[in-house]
Amino acid sequence: MVQHSTPTLSKTSLNALSSIPYAEALSPSYIVHLDQLEKNCQLLKSVAERSGANILLALKGYACYSTFPIIKQYLSGTTSSGLHEALLAKEFFGKEVHVYSPAYKVDEIKKLSSFAHSLVFNSAQQLFNGLETLKGKRHPDLGLRVNPEYSEVGIDLYDSCVPSSRLGTNRTALDQSLNTLSFDLLKNLDGLHFHALCEQDADTLERTVDEFEAKFRDLIANMKWVNFGGGHHITRPKYDVERLIKVVKRFREKYSVDVYLEPGEAVALHTGVLVVTILDIVESGGLKTAIIDSSFTCHMPDVLEMPYRPSILGAGTLDEYMHNYRLGGISCLAGDVAGDYSFPEALKVGQRLVFLDMSHYTMVKNTTFNGVPLPAISLYSESQGLRTVRHFGYEDYRARLS
């Protein structure tokens, strides 16, 4: 397993998360720190105001709608990956609803067109199909996702510009499709969309924008807007905010277009935790494994998919402290384990552990494999304290399988 670790929390964020009364929480339970979430949103709003960009919440990364009343005060709207996310945005967030999908069904296009601000298609053929479906009807802005064929993402699973990617159309494929379908398709296009970043800084965005311009400059001039996609780690400590603002302002002024950014992770970065309880400690081959009442494959899937080693409050790397342990999940999957950790004191059955940075790409990716219960969802703020907003049980497992 690759031993990546989560981005370093600032001392202020760590102190804030440490103040949560974990002993009072259900186990397992996600806890979102609302004060930290609002700080992230305030920073994003500042970036939007200074750069002129429109910043959207990407629901694929974070969709805890009980926190939307805070987020929608600061962001322009949401971006969704399909009908159900878009409906959630319409119901609980409001404001602008943008949608992109690798492919749409006809009935989805019809439903989305009644309330979406924009529909972004993945290929010229999908755009053509959408226009046929919407012919003679009022419709939202139409966009096309393009592939700039440039990426600095090091993991293929998360690299949407990997060779032979199915996400977005490159310039050669676009020109061939237009030659076959109709060059008039572009007359119906309001915007272009690219997504090539993953947890990266503004310098990567700047180089990506240069490649995007080199391949699609002739089309950009005729657009109303360009969407720079997600993967911008704007709220991470030491992120180069000034460079981001410079890149966005230069592009807007050069082409007279609106610019959209759609971070999901940056909205919720360092705002939440997952509280778990140690159920047993087993020893095999000289290694102690603490088995928790949660599951990495069910509740923290990116730990195995990325893979990475999630940080634990008060824990260190292997041999940093006196007592070493591996963390194991409750499912029967042999690989349901995280990395190796060390602790200042020996762990005990019944003890609580707190995994850090567990707001984004957790709740939205949970499964009930093995019938493992989903963690409760709780909110915390200094003014309101800790409160549980959702608890899951057998009925939630059963309802998915009938």
Image (tube, grey):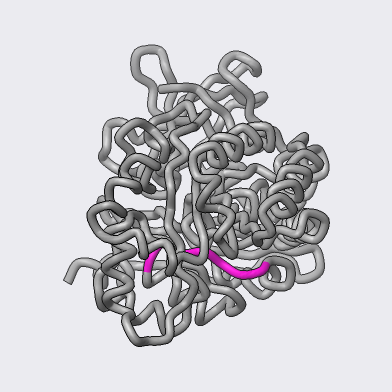
Query: Magenta includes 321?
Result: no
Residue 26 position (above or below residue 105) = above
Residue at 47 percent across and 75 percent down: it is 88
Is 79 a magenta residue? yes
Q: Could you tell me residue 356's position as x and y percent? A: 61, 42
Q: What range is drawn magenta here? A: 76-82
The answer to which of 366 and 39 lies nearer the viewer is: 39
Quarter of the image holding residue 388? bottom right
Q: Is residue 293 depicted above or below 185 in this figure?
A: above
Q: Residue at x 70, y 45 (%)?
A: 234
Name which quarter of the figure residue 310 lies in: top right
Nearer-the-camera pick, 38 or 57: 57
Q: Quadrant of residue 66?
A: bottom right
Q: Nearer the viewer, residue 395 or 133?
A: 133
Pick the front one: 313 or 234: 234
Q: Is residue 60 left or right of residue 233?
A: left
Q: Is residue 59 visible?
A: yes
Query: Picture coordinates of residue 129 (x, y %)?
Result: 26, 68
Residue shown at 44% from the left, 77% from the top: 87
The quarter of the rendered structure image containing the C terminus is: bottom left
